Amino acid sequence: MPFSRISSDLIGSENATRLAALQEDYEFLGRKLARRGLSIDRIKERVKAFTVAIPSWGVGAGGTRFARFPLAGEPRSVWEKLEDCSVVQDLGRNTPCISIHFPWDWTDDLKGLRQAAVQLGLHFGPVNSNTFQDRPGADLSYKYGSLTHTDRHVQEQAIAHNRACIEGGVALGSKALTVWIGDGTNFPGQQDFTASFDRYLESAEKIYAALPGDWTLLIEHKLYEPAFYSTVIQDWGTSYIAATHLGDRAKCLVDLGHHAPTVNIEMIVARLARFGKLGGFHFNDSKYGDDDLDAGSIDPFRLFLIFNELVEADLRGSGVASLEHMIDQSHNVTDPIESLLLSAEAIAGAYARALIVDRDTLHGAQAGNDVVMAREQLRTAYETPMGPVLAMARYECGGAIDPVAVFRASGYREDRARDRPAGGGATSAGIV
Ligand code: PSV
Ligand code: MN
């Protein structure tokens, strides 16, 4: 399929109108950071090396359990999703990786899909399996569970699907499988908590055994939904137990929306990292539950505190450098491309701020119980506007200084609304 791209000429001409201002802001910030003993160029290089994966399902319009409002020009196939992902990458330059979801994105031409991705400067990250929905025509239903179902045949069907995801992922060059199950109960007494977790472990062992040697199994926990009374893999403790039970290549994936509203997620991150079980993230933001809002849009400070723990873990040598960073959002009322650009920027921005925390002063203040001074180190870093570093990193990598402005100027969405007429068949439930 011939792909539409944002022209580099447009990016160049739009950048030309903003470059002088960016240089001025970058130099000013550089002087400010230098007074704190920090090299802005060094931080910029670390930002350039940071990437976050885009969820294939995130480029289509999302929805709620009440409705989904389609977006004119949204992708209708995995190929068109790839096309939109390449726009995000071409403009933002920190999202070269796509996290795919099977069977939503299934195609018989996985080889062609991989080649197309390479042609667009993209590659595939963790594969997400889906046993939370019934597949049309499937023999058995997941209504009462999948990997933890009381019927061994349903369990086997769910295991086989995960094995197929691994095979598909191998064809795409992926190196990880993310397993999130919707299994749980709606009523007290509906299931035996212990027996259902035992069934999970039994199923997960079989999936783990099918992993290629260089693959990681990412276990994603979630407090509630679609089950409303109990969830089998409901929290990080359960996820940690499962990952420990399975082996070294099983790790925990933290989706920021999968916790009760006041839970201290940054502390969970510190714990998992300390014991080598942190595998990656699904970034998003929320106010009430698993809202799947844009990362950093509601509580950017929490995002910063999470990255602060990651930088600490990195300094301790906890092996967090190779984490799978992914976005998992549902864009119900925004253009997904714009949301993804801004989310990826917010995530990279949280990382950049975490990099400029004065660690020596912080650690000294912690050791001496100087509460105010410790707190001040985080606040000072958090309140430093790192926008010029992010924009300069993007610019130097060939991206747009102002990605959303260039996206709007390109007319990409209007063009896709014309050449992607609606009704071409959705490739996901749409409500994610
Ligand atoms: C579940 O809420 C989840 O976070 C899992 O990652 C799914 O795979 C994804 O959302 C898409 O529905
Ligand atoms: Mn998720």
Image (spheres, rainbow, N blue to C red):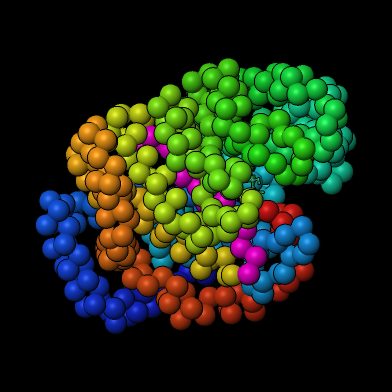
Q: Can residue 249 be seen in this view?
A: yes
Q: Where is residue 394 in the image (x, y as percent from the top left)?
A: 32, 63
Q: Which residue is drawn at 27% across and 46% down?
A: 372
Q: 201 or 420, which is in the foreground?
A: 201
- Please state the extent of the stretch shown in magenta in the rendering: 320-333
Q: Which residue is drawn at 56% across and 32% down?
A: 236
The verdict on residue 311 being magenta is: no
- Residue 312 appears left or right of 142: left
Q: Residue at x 66, y 39 (%)?
A: 223
Q: Where is residue 416 in the image (x, y as percent from the top left)?
A: 60, 74
The vertical placement of 125 against 252, above or below, is below
Q: 208 or 359, which is in the foreground?
A: 359
The verdict on residue 322 being magenta is: yes
Could you say which quadrant of the image residue 301 lies in? bottom left
Q: Quadrant of the N terminus?
A: bottom right
- Residue 303 appears left or right of 192: left
